[in-house]
Amino acid sequence: TCYNAFFVRKDLYMKWNIDADADGRERVVPFEPTIEHLHEVTMGTQIYQLYDGTIKLSGCQKLLWHRRPILEEHMQVLKNVRDRTFPFAPSIETSNSGCGDANNNKKGGKNVGIDNVHNAAVIGHEEQEEILNQQLEQEKMMYHHLAVDMSPYCEYLSSSQIPSTSSPTVNQSTTKEKRAKCSNDIYQQLKRDGFALIRGTRIPSKTCIDAIKWTDTFLQSANEKVRRSCLTKDRARRGYSPQNSENFASLIGAKGSNDLVRKFRVGPNSSSRITSTLSLPSPPSTSTSTTKMSSALLQPNSWPSNETWGEENATQFQESITAYYDQICHVAHAIVNAICDGIRTHNPNILLPPSLVGVGENTNINIRNCYSSNTSQEIENTSILTLLGYKKGARHQGKHASPLVAAHTDVGVITVLLFDGGDSAVLQRSQSTNNRGCEANGPSWVDVKLPRVIPEDPVFVVNIGDCLSDMCGAMLPSTLHRVMPSKGGTVARNCLALFMGLKPDDMLHLPNSDGNDERMTYEEWRRRRIARAQAELSKHKVNKS
């Protein structure tokens, strides 16, 4: 049968068959009963490999008696899916005519094209390193081209480039032209799908790499006791949040699986404001009065202590995350300045909070007011930096893997994301911009492609939040997005996500279809937005019951 067999000693079998021939009887077994003859391959498992080194299985893919699946990802020799490339593939460089050129497959005198297949069956470690470096260099050039250059808005984040207030700005017309192009480029990307890639932020690559490294150390390597020492009463705004303790689907009033991701949040302290560490000249004095902020988003941060994690780990983690937080908050303001310039260029009637606008003759003053280190001119906001740690788990198994973070939209103004090169999770955005999808089976999804390594000029992902989308009358969509398990991925993936918020008392003008703007503070808008999602969720529960 498929599963069973009878085994007989060869001497007895031969005697039985010989006697049968002598007596004129028909043989019981008319052929030589070897394993090869008797074996039926109805339950066989075949293994083969693709050109990129991926191991594939065919046929039966389970342990028959243990009733456990044989998973392809467990069979992979190249564990990191990003390492799976055909080492003898022709270079992506081509001549202007579009035809292949032998020289295009060479770099440094060594042919790495498909002709090499005939010359080598096995590629050495040094050749693999060279090919990988070439791929990363080509990838770097591609993302450099695709990402919007934000340097016209971020140039004043370097103190040496601040123009003097007593003299006219050098190349003022050129600066305006560059800003106009920058604001239009990011506006068009965001208008198309709610997401954009950016670079030219002036944040050093080392700052990003250090923050990502310590995020991985804290969320993936540290003892759970260390992480739980940072638990707070309000874990949605500060400190550590374990896996399966939050549900982002509720942000759109939907019901979905809890988020399978570890999170850690930092933000502005209730006793202090975010200030720039840059040494900039003081702007012309306008007003020394400040508004006392009162919001649930303003509260003390919670850090791992020296006792639970050791002084060196605790100190370096806090310093690297704080340094990144301070700089990305300033960059987020510059990004929003550019977006708002694009909005007002396409619709001058849109009213936006003065703190977000960076267009016109007063652009330099606005940037100075945002980034001055003078104590009377400090950035005030409710932006929260969330550290996210994904790793391979139960949701990676099966043909229909469920999301690590369910489909949702972000509540704030914008979100600025920085990812490492892990392959266990992938960010996806909806192709539909109405947040519900027009397809019969729901929205279709597109992977948000990112570089495998953080380049010298870091590349970030920016997406529009509900607040900014409401302020511009949905000129820019707050796009539905989610995080899915990456099939075959085994390397943990980490992300730094800045959810930009405004001052609680910033006044918003929300366009209505009847032409009358609705006015409310950012704090009032935020509470109403969350209440609306909770009401929608309650409605779903009532309908199901």
Image (cartoon, grey):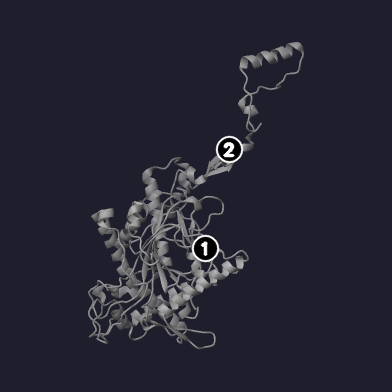
Task: From the viewer's side, name the closer residue of 126 and 327.
Answer: 327
Lateral position of residue 322 relative to residue 70, left or right: left
Residue 176, horizontal then vertical, whole percent:
36, 81
What's under tag 2, amino acid-wise?
Leu
Residue 491, horizontal then vertical, whole percent:
42, 51
- Using the numbered discs, state the Cα–Cα distance from disc 1 to disc 2 in whole angstroms: 37 Å
User: Which quarter of the figure has residue 174?
Assistant: bottom left
Residue receiving disc 1: 446
Task: From the viewer's side, name the closer residue of 235 and 376.
Answer: 235
User: Which quarter of the figure has residue 369?
Assistant: bottom left
In terms of sequence position, does the residue under pointer 1 or pointer 2 come before the other? 2
Task: From the viewer's side, name the closer residue of 47 and 115.
Answer: 47
Residue 172, horizontal then vertical, whole percent:
31, 82
Given contact means CB atoms under 8 Å apart, are the residues at marks 1 and 2 in contact? no
Q: Secondary structure at mark 1?
A: strand
Q: Is residue 530 above or below residue 394?
A: below
Question: Residue 523's mark?
Answer: none
